[in-house]
Amino acid sequence: MPDPATGSAARLYRVALPMSVGFDHPAARRTTSDSLVLRLTLDGVTGIGECAPRAYVTGETSGSVTEALRHVPLDKVFAQLRTTPARQLLDQLREEGFESTFGVSGGNNLICLLETAVLDLIGHQLGLSAGESAWPGTPVADKVAISQVLDLSIGTDEFLDTRGPFHFVKVKASDDIDRDVRTVTAIRERLGPAVPVMVDANMSWTPATAVTYARRLHAAGVTLVEEPLPRRSWEDLRTLRRATGIRVLLDESVCTLDDARAAVAHEACDAVNVRVAKNGGLLRSARLIEYARSAGIGFQIGVQVAETGPLINASRALALRAPDALAVEGGQSDRFFPEAETIVSPRPAVDRTANTIAPAEGPGFALRLNDAAERWAFLSWTHADWHPTTPEETP
């Protein structure tokens, strides 16, 4: 319930939805979601944001982001939202970024959580979609084709039989290069040469094995490899590219714009993976895409596994305005979570007959938290302080 003295309130949800099917890759195995969702309410207008911290990506966890959020002066954030005209504030956010605009610093997931909630709230105030807010004047596609991901929880034959049509295939590497070569070979035999195939090693190769692995996969028909070496192994990545001719897409190594600049300066990559939570929000992600274009490298618009709400539509807002993306990951929330447990309405949809996504209709992220979200509420902010959520508090 908003503070009657200020008309403002915040509510934090830690969402750990059990997944109907797990997702396995070399860096982690996931059977539940792990997201933080923040709802801000100001004078009757609501905005919701989300982050998905992964310790192996940015070093952040849901616990560390929660602790950092407790130290954010939300009263000052709300005061600025109230006293600065929404259009002016949006222009300032695009020009200066969230941290400078609101005087808040922190890790990428903390900034993502706050920024997405604020952008959603401003979107509702102005009647603008999140994409219009972050990337004004950019044409929006009617639909975008999405990639399909073969992780270690599903066999190659089942994947090929059930997950098409295929526009781009990402294969999560195993700990057995022979298996990975067989997998790529089977995909090429079934799909032919036209569909790009990328193997994501999630930092599991070493400088001693990388050249051999890359050459074998390249011979089997791989288009790219993703994050093959320990993060920010700039010199070894350049050596790998020069020795094998393999194209490299970087993910965990590129969390900031400075990371991307370093990768380009060292000739360490051909493309980067842009993920809204990993890269610190929608605005930073849009800037990273613009930099990739200016530097002459490609980009993929990716997702965190098991996103549950605003992050889904945040990455889609970018994807629908980026026809030059190498690939777009649409997420698998429709496969991971039963509809009855989905915490947002309307449920973000994927056209599985065509494997495409379409724009969301409405202001902000065009989502609202539904009753299923309330079981995950655990902190509320009123009177300039956080406290445990109680059953008596109204959503």
Image (tube, helix red, strand yellow):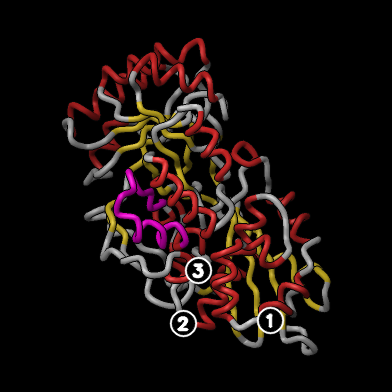
Label 3 belongs to which residue? Answer: 344
* Identity of the residue drawn at 31% across and 66% down: 139
Pick the quarter of the image with the N terminus: bottom right
Residue 316 as seen in the image, left or right of residue 388 = left
Q: Residue 127 got which mark? A: 2
Q: Residue 289 got which mark? A: none
Q: Compared to 237, does 256 lie above or below?
A: below
Residue 38 as seen in the image, left or right of residue 155 = right
Q: Compared to 76, does 97 lie above or below?
A: above
User: Is residue 171 or residue 241 the one in the foreground?
Assistant: 241
Q: Amino acid at mark 1?
A: Thr
Comparing marks 2 and 1, which lies closer to the viewer?
A: 2
Dot placed on the residue nearer the N-terminal end, 3 or 2: 2
| CA distance separating discs 3 and 1 | 17 Å
Q: Indicate the secondary structure of the residue bearing disc 2.
A: loop
Label 1 belongs to which residue? Answer: 394
| CA distance separating discs 2 and 1 | 26 Å
Determine if the magenta segment contains residue 350.
Answer: no
Dot placed on the residue nearer the N-terminal end, 2 or 1: 2
Residue 351 in percent (x, y) is at 28, 59
User: Is residue 85 or residue 369 the one in the foreground?
Assistant: 85
- Identify the magenta region: 314-331
User: Is residue 187 or residue 128 the one in the foreground?
Assistant: 128
Residue 378 in percent (x, y) is at 72, 64
Pick the quarter of the image with the C terminus: bottom right
* Identity of the residue drawn at 30% across and 29% down: 223
- The residue carrying pointer 2 sits among few (fewer than 14), some (14 to 19) or many (20 or more) residues within 10 Å by Cα, namely some
